[in-house]
Image (cartoon, helix red, strand yellow):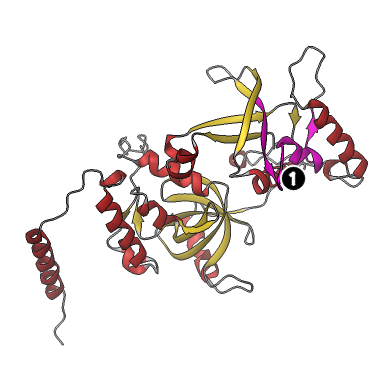
Amino acid sequence: GDTIMVRVGTQEQLAARPWECAERRISFSSLRAPRLGARSRNEPDQPYAQEAREALRQRILGKKCTVSVEYERAGPEGMQPRQFATVMCQVRKVRKNAALVVVEDGLADVIRHRAEDERSSQYDELQAAVVAAKEAGRGMWASNATTEPVQRRVVDLTGNAQQARGHLTSLQAPKPGPYKAGEHRAVVEYVINGSRMRVFLPQENMLLTFALGGILTPQTARSANKGRTATAAEPFATEAMMYTRALALQRDVTVEIETMDKGGNCIGQMYTKRGQERVNLGVALVEAGLARVNEYSVNYTPCGDALKREEAVAKRKRLNIWKDYVEPSAEELAAAKAAAALGSLNTMTVC
């Protein structure tokens, strides 16, 4: 609730080439917000931590902002100093300090600084907002506000293939409401690589690994582990991952679950916003030349034709992974067609 990630770059970079932008972790000046517990250690959240995070996610995520770094604090040994800033962005048609989003709702407090301490340039406004939230009894200042840590009970399918496969039928079943069978509202919690993410389904209270169907993105680097040798990142792996982070990380998305692999990872399509446009993330990656069509699985996904069409355009423009692409000659195309026909004859069954 008191720290955000900002992406720094030109308007063109932010819109079309997010991998060229620098990412910086910024803490809000003079703000004391409740902390989320570490799920890996089964730690509970502090009261109102989830509400503070959701308020910031819903109201400032993806907004253009101005960041004014005001002071720093030394981090742990070997780590960069922690930067504190006032972040100004457009919230409900008004330019305001993003920290006020949580302070006004009673979801965060203001640090009581010593006289010589550095502080927010809008410290007086933050203090006034705390007073107003207390008088209105909002959030942590309500008369019935909880003071007990909050233990999240989430069905985590990310590390258990057998448990995940046991939920596939229910995940693909029709449900009441505006969503069709297999379709769910989701939030992307973590981006593993350009086409693989961990997503949270709020209605099911479920965390799962989701892979985009019909495409292949360049593989990121892998460290040696349990007999597996280390591998370097493929070209444009970082660009693909950063593109997916820019369009999907912490966003409200819609996922369509088509199938599941043997590792318990859901496979399907994901729809997100690019500006005001609703886009299929897999198609957008292929369009940007950051993914290629999976020749096998593309035939089993409803957007297969769109993926093939966008790949042809990206090849023609020689975008990113296709920068060295050479159009096959007429003879090569004829040979490939003949080989495909021969393969088809060899797999026929005589009745």
Identify the residue at horizontal 44%, vertical 50% (top origin): 196
Q: Nearer the viewer, residue 226 or 90?
A: 90
Instruction: Please say whether residue 324 is visible from this viewpoint.
Output: yes
Identify the residue at horizontal 9%, vertical 68% (top origin): 338
Q: Is residue 328 magenta?
A: no
Is residue 313 left or right of 341 when viewed as pictured?
Answer: right
Instruction: Please say whether residue 162 is visible from this viewpoint.
Output: no
Which residue in the protein does label 1 denote?
150
In the picture, which quadrant includes the C terminus? bottom left
In the picture, which quadrant includes the N terminus? top right
x, y percentage for residue 312?
27, 58
Q: Amino acid at mark 1?
A: Val
Identify the residue at horizontal 80%, vertical 31% (top origin): 126
**Extreme-bottom residue of the structure:** 351
x, y percentage for residue 264?
45, 57
- The number of discs equals 1
Is residue 341 left or right of 286 when viewed as pictured?
Answer: left
x, y percentage for residue 155?
60, 55
**Extreme-top residue of the structure:** 116
Q: Nearer the viewer, residue 336 or 13?
A: 13
Q: For the magenta stretch, what is the residue range?
A: 84-110
Is residue 169 left or right of 129 when viewed as pictured?
Answer: left
Q: Is residue 96 magenta?
A: yes
- Up/down of 340 relative to 292, above or below: below
